[in-house]
Image (cartoon, grey):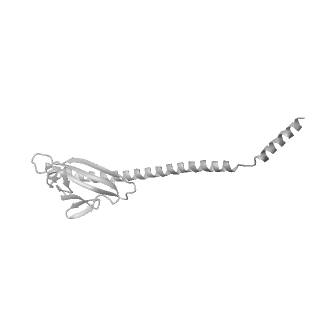
Amino acid sequence: MIMNNLKKIIRRFGQLANKEGGFGMVELITAAFVFSIISIIVATNFVNVLNLQRRGFGAQKIQEETLFALESMAREIRVSQIQSPDDLGCNLTSLTMDHPISGSVRYSVSGGIINKTVGGNTFPITSAKINFTRLNFCVRGSGIDDEQPRVTIVASVQTASGREGLRFDIQTTISSRDVREEFLN
């Protein structure tokens, strides 16, 4: 009797399985639609993550190169006598100074690259990876006795490739000290 009941159950299950032999067209279209939506969401998020990573690398590139250039200029401004005239309007596009060891030093920007001129030789201090769209100098107190000259550097920097669309505006002020006596002794 148990065997007969078991055989009946197996037959009924087999009949049900034969009637519903697979997915219907509606189920397949629904599954494809849901899969497509999920794929689009995942792909969009992946592209957004890649763009954020690219922007992060661009910002890092700008920061490293700009900090190197500003620190290089600041080191020389601190120990040099500023030869450029006072300009409170930040209209100077180059800065000339008299370094106690190197002599006349001049900083300027050309083609988006900061150049340093020492003894008639000009060489870049930034690479072509970034582009200085603005480099201006504000000079205060260069011709006044007993006052420390101050130089404010105002710069706008962007990535050279432009794909990241990053631009930074930077400003810093450096005081010059009269250290001629320290170098002469």
Picture quadrant where residue 16 is located: top right
Q: Is residue 102 above or below residue 141?
A: below
- Position in image of residue 81 (x %, y %): 15, 53
Towards the viewer: 111 or 148? 111
Q: State how many labels appear.
A: 0
Q: Is residue 162 left or right of residue 123?
A: right
- Position in image of residue 115 (x %, y %): 25, 60
Q: Which residue lies at the image location 58% right of the left edge and 51% below the top edge?
A: 36
Q: Which residue lies at the image location 32% right of the left edge and 50% below the top edge?
A: 168
Q: Which residue lies at the image location 32% right of the left edge and 57% below the top edge?
A: 131
Residue at the top extreme of this rendering: 1
Q: Is residue 18 above or below residue 102?
A: above
Q: Is residue 56 left or right of residue 67?
A: right
Q: Is residue 126 left or right of residue 77?
A: right
Q: Is residue 185 visible to us here?
A: no
Picture quadrant where residue 84 is located: bottom left
Q: Is residue 176 above or below residue 8?
A: below
Towards the viewer: 9 or 62? 9
Q: Is residue 179 visible to us here?
A: yes
Residue at the bottom extreme of this rendering: 120
- Position in image of residue 79 (x %, y %): 19, 51
Towards the viewer: 89 or 20? 20
Towards the viewer: 25 or 153? 25
Q: Which residue lies at the image location 29% right of the left edge and 50% below the top edge?
A: 169
Residue at the right extreme of this rendering: 1
- Position in image of residue 171 (x %, y %): 26, 48
Q: Quadrant of the N terminus?
A: top right
